[in-house]
Structures are given as C-alpha cells and as structure tokens.
Amino acid sequence: MPQLNLQKAMEDKMRSLLKLIFIAFNLLMAFWFISTWFKASADFHLLSHAEQTGTVLGLLTADFLIAFFWATGDVILGLPLLLMRRDKT
C-alpha cells in the first residue's frame, strides 16, 4: 500500500511539473508573438512605402513561424498532459 501512495505522489508531482512547463511555454510564446509586433511597429511611420511593405511581409513570415513553433510545442507538451490525466474513479 505505501508503494501505491508513493507512485501516486510521484505522478502528481510529474503532472504538476508538466502543467507548469506547459503554462510557462504558452506565456513565453505569447510574449514572443506580441513583442515582434511592438518591435516592428516602433518606427513604422518613419519608413518609406517599400520599407513598410517589406516590414509587413517579414512580420507575417515571422508570425507564421512563431505560430508553427507554438502549435508544435503545444502538441509536444500537451499530449503527455492529456495522457497523464487523473481518473475520475
């Protein structure tokens, strides 16, 4: 019986650690996503039309890559969280 309690405690700690990593990853990705917009729009009004077009295209490319990394990381970190769910019984 004590072995079962120890195993359950270890699973709870692992689940909590994974959940913390998952939340931290999402916060980091949200910060990265938002900071690219602020960095790109800092002196946007001072740029010529061609520079503004290049900035927008670069920003869209960067946003796509960030969204891809974000989704990939969420799948990689989220699957173990779903598989380690506690039973209702």
Image (cartoon, helix red, strand yellow):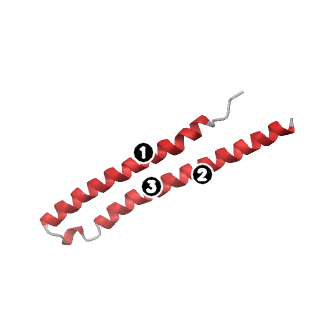
**Furthest-right residue in this view:** 1
Dividing the image into 4 quarters, which one contains the N terminus? top right
Query: What's the residue at 54%, 51% (across, down)?
Result: 23
Q: Dot 3: what SS?
A: helix
Residue carrying label 2: 20
Compared to residue 56, the image places residue 86 above or below, namely above
Query: What's the residue at 25%, 71% (across, down)?
Result: 43
Coordinates of residue 31 in the picture (x, y in percent): 44, 59
**Furthest-left residue in this view:** 49
Compared to residue 1, the image places residue 10 above or below, namely below
CA separation, marks 2 and 3? 14 Å
**Furthest-top residue in this view:** 89
Say what amino acid the circle numbered 1 marks.
Ala
CA separation, marks 3 and 1? 10 Å
Residue carrying label 3: 29
Horizontal side of 14 relative to 63 (left or right) equals right
Dividing the image into 4 quarters, which one contains the C terminus? top right
Snapshot quadrant of residue 11: top right
Query: What's the residue at 38%, 59% (across, down)?
Result: 34
Snapshot quadrant of residue 6: top right
Q: Dot 2: what SS?
A: helix
Q: Does label 2 or label 3 sit earlier along the sequence?
A: 2
Q: Nearer the viewer, residue 3 or 42?
A: 3
Say what amino acid the circle numbered 2 marks.
Leu
Residue carrying label 1: 71
Circle 3: is it few (<14), some (14-19), or many (20+) Cα within 10 Å? some
